[in-house]
Image: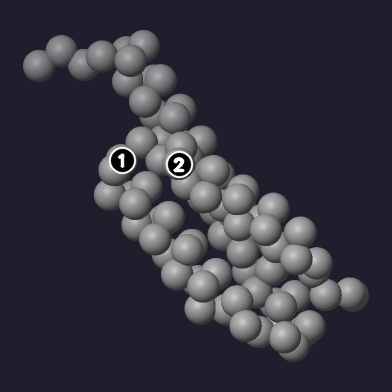
Amino acid sequence: MAAASRAQVLRLYRALLRESQRFGGYNYRTYAIRRIRDAFRENKNITDSEKIEELVNKAKANLEIIHRQVCLYISRTIAEQENPTVN
């Protein structure tokens, strides 16, 4: 498989940041954004195409995880708004 192009990596980076912005909790949101930025900065000078593909695949998996977590948070928030518990 060909190495990911710079444009593909940048699209993935932006998608990760965009999806992380959807976290409802401030701490989750800032942690995710910080980790994404740090990981991309740390690996910006890698030239080995196999290593780049490995990192891109890992980032795609993390994007799916973030998406699932955000969707779960949103669905729980909606359910709580529709069915508030009385204390």
Of discs 2 and 1, which sits in the foreground? 2
Q: Which residue is mark 1?
A: 25
Taking the spot 51% from the left edge, 73% from the top edge, the residue there is 41
Q: Quadrant of residue 68?
A: top right
Bin the neighbour count of mark 1 within 10 Å (Cα to Cα): few under 14, some 14-19, many 20 and up.
few
Nearer to us in this view, 84 or 30: 30
Residue 61 seen from this side: no
Which residue does the image show at 47% across and 46% down from the upper left?
Answer: 20
- Which residue type does callout 2 highlight? Gln
Q: Residues within 10 Å of mark 2 (few under 14, many from 20)?
A: some
Say which residue label 2 marks: 21
- CA gap between label 2 and label 1 equals 10 Å
Q: Is residue 71 visible?
A: yes
Place of residue 70 in the rendered image (x, y in percent of width and height, measured from the top left)? 47, 40
Residue 18 to residue 58: above or below: above
Q: In which quadrant of the rendered image does the C terminus lie?
A: top left
Residue 77 vertical placement versus 56 (above, below): above
Q: Is residue 63 above or below residue 26?
A: below
| Image location (x, y in percent) of residue 8 | 76, 59
Q: Secondary structure at mark 1?
A: loop
